[in-house]
Each structure stands twice: as C-alpha cells, then as structure tokens.
C-alpha cells in the first residue's frame, strides 16, 4: 500500500509544473482543511486507543473465563456468587494459561473470546492506525512549501503581483476617478507607488495613458494627476516620452488587427496630449513630432478618396492639439509646422485632392483662422 501511495504522489508531483497557480482563496481553503484533518486524525487515534482499552474497563470484575463441558469450549460466566475469592483467582490464572495454549492451537468450532489486559495490549490490532500516520505526515510535509510560493509571488519584485495590483486596486480607483475623488485617489497612489519600484511606476503610467485615451472627457483630470505625481517620481516623464513615441503609430492610415483598437482612441489621445502640453509635462520636441506625423499622414491620404473619413479624423485631432491653453513658444512652433500646408490644402481643387472632403476643407479654414488669430492676439 505504501508503494502504491508513493507512486501516486510521484505522479502528482510530475504534473505540478503544468498546473496553473492556485488562487489565494483556494490556498486558504486547503490550509483550513489540513488543520481540520490534523485535529480529526488525533481524535481517531484517541478513539482507537480507547477502544483497545475498552475490554479492560468492562465494569464487571466478576467475569472470568472457564472451560465448560470438558470439550475446550470457552464461555463467560458470572461466578462471583458461587465461587470463593481464592478459587476465583486460581481459576483466573488457570484460564489465562489455557487461553494462551488455545490461542496457539485454536479449535475450528470454538466461538470468539475476550482477551485479558495483557493480551489486548500485545495484540497487533492497532497496527492499521499506525500505518495511516506516514500518510498524514507525508501530506503535512508539503504544507510549508505553499506559503513560501504565496509570499514570493506577491512581493514588489514579482511581475505577477504587480499586474494583479494594477488590474484590481489601482484600476478600481481610476474607474471612480472624478473631481470629487481627485485628492483621495492621488493620496492613495502616493502610498502605492515607490521610488524603488521603477517598473511598477512605468506600468502605472501606461495604464493612465490607456484610460485617458479611452475616456477623453477625463483627460484633463488624468493629465493633472500625472503632472502632480511626476513631481515626486520623475521616472514618469521618461515613460511619457517613450509612450508618446510608441503611440505615434496610431496615426498611420493602414490598419492591422493589432492597431485597430488603438486607432479608435485617436481623439482621446490627442486631447490627452493637449492637456499634458498645457501643464508643461510634454516639451516642444514631443509636440513637434506629433504635428509632423499628423501632417505627413494627411499629405498621404488627401490624394485617395477612400481616406476621406480618416482625413476628417486627422483634422479633428489637429484641432484638439491647437485649441489647448499652450504657451507662446508652443503656439509659434505649431504655426511654423502647419500654417503653410493649411493654406495649400484650401487652395487645392477638388479633383487633385479627392480625399479632402468639404468637412475637411472647413476644418482647414477654422484651424488657419485660429492660428492666425492667436498670432495677432499674442503679438
């Protein structure tokens, strides 16, 4: 039985690398079952030992063993009322020796009999209880391993633990993010983020980018949140610039399965960049790259009629970037990049630019008037 058990244990342990990690709730349930099984096992051992001692405490000290009929048949009789005490002791010793000889050469037709206290203690009946002890000890030796894995997985250095914190605690806070909860969320994030957790801060910045691009009406709050946090954790600025470089691909007109979802967030991302620029989180070089990319995409798409809607979306993005409360230097940079091209697109005939719809032409005029009017006001 022990050999079969060890083979089963080895088979289970061989499958362990392919199993998915157990959840925290499942570990707690298994641990509670082990604790209960330990108590129950101790209770069974006590009950078995009590049962093995039961024949000793029968409560009838007058019961003795006698040979009846001279035919080797044993019976239990109550002789305390008929036999004197010294005869009972002599009969008891004689019965003890006869029971041992009969136990060695048992008769086929003899009924069962009860052992005395000395024989009951030497009987191997409690051995099955002892055989279960190695099984219980074997299971308990595995218990200290799982708490170690549980702790290590949720350390700050564990990528799995960081992802779980980001996807549960922080995301829940961002889902209820509003003007009323701004201070509460910001204070909570200051407690979660740590200066020694650089990768964790980067993942948080990426999560804010995605959230702001998907919900453009909260872009100003998300931009303000990053602006406040980057004062304590400058690593956010580095991640913002890296994310901006990655997000430049969403302006491309060619769509793939990987970028189709990101392109739905173009307007939200443009609004988020505009808010970050107004708070001076993004520098002039970052804005210049964005505007140059948008201008190049428009120049490539206006000559193809199938990109009419895409060009209209590009102009909506330009409008959000240009209408932000930006500094004079950023405004002059935008004028130097777009003002000349806007005039050329307006002057082009419809036949030469079939991808430029009437809506896009009016958007060009509005942008040109906006940039020109701001230039006059600032001058």
Image (tube, rainbow, N blue to C red):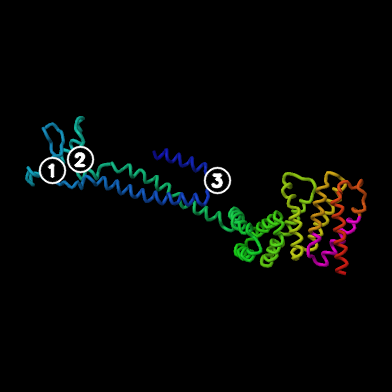
x%, y% of residue 153?
55, 54
Badge 1 is on which residue?
Answer: 92
Q: Residue at x 77, y 53 (%)?
A: 248
- How many C-alpha atoms fall within 10 Å of the one at disc 1: few (<14), some, or many (≥20)? some
Instruction: Name the quadrant containing residue 342.
Output: bottom right
- Please provide the residue range marked out in magenta: 321-343
Magenta-colored segment: predominant secondary structure: helix
The label shown at residue 20 is 3
How far, Cα to Cα, is label 1 from label 2?
A: 13 Å
x%, y% of residue 284?
80, 63
Question: Which mark is in front, 1 or 3?
Answer: 3
Q: Nearer the viewer, residue 9 or 233?
A: 233
x%, y% of residue 366?
85, 58
Left or right: residue 98 compared with residue 122: left
Secondary structure, mark 2, is: loop
Q: Residue at x 74, y 50 (%)?
A: 264
Badge 2 is on which residue?
Answer: 114
Name the residue furthest top.
108
């Amino acid at each position: 039985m022990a050999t079969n058990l060890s083979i089963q244990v080895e088979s289970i342990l061989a499958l362990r690398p392919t199993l998915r990690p157990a959840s925290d709730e499942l570990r707690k349930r298994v641990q509670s079952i082990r604790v209960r099984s330990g108590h129950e096992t101790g209770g069974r051992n006590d009950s078995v030992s009590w049962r093995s001692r039961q024949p000793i405490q029968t409560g009838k000290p007058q019961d003795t063993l006698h040979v009846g009929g001279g035919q080797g048949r044993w019976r239990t009789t109550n002789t305390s009322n008929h036999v004197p005490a010294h005869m009972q002791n002599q009969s008891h010793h004689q019965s003890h020796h006869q029971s041992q000889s009969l136990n060695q050469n048992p008769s086929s037709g003899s009924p069962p009999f009860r052992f005395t206290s000395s024989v009951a203690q030497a009987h191997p009946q409690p051995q099955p209880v002892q055989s279960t002890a190695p099984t219980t000890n074997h299971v308990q030796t595995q218990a200290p391993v799982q708490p170690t894995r549980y702790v290590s997985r949720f350390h700050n250095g564990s990528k799995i633990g960081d992802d779980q914190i980001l996807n549960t605690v922080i995301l829940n806070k961002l889902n209820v993010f509003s003007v009323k909860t701004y201070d509460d969320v910001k204070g909570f994030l200051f407690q979660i983020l740590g200066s020694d957790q650089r990768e964790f801060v980067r993942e948080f910045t990426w999560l804010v980018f995605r959230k702001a691009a998907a919900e453009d009406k909260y872009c100003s709050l998300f931009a303000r949140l990053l602006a406040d946090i980057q004062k304590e954790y400058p690593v956010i600025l580095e991640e913002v610039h890296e994310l901006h470089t990655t997000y430049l691909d969403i302006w491309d007109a060619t769509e793939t399965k990987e970028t189709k979802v990101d392109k739905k967030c173009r307007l939200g991302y443009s609004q988020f960049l505009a808010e970050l620029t107004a708070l001076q989180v993004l520098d002039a070089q970052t804005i210049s790259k964005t505007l140059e990319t948008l201008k190049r995409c428009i120049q490539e798409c206006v000559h193809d009629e199938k990109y009419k809607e895409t060009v209209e979306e590009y102009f909506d993005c330009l409008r959000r970037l240009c209408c932000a409360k930006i500094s004079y230097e950023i405004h002059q940079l935008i004028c130097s990049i777009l003002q000349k091209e806007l005039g050329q697109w307006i002057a082009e005939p419809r036949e030469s630019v079939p991808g430029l719809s009437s809506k896009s032409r009016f958007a060009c005029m509005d942008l040109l008037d906006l940039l020109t009017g701001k230039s006059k006001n600032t001058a």
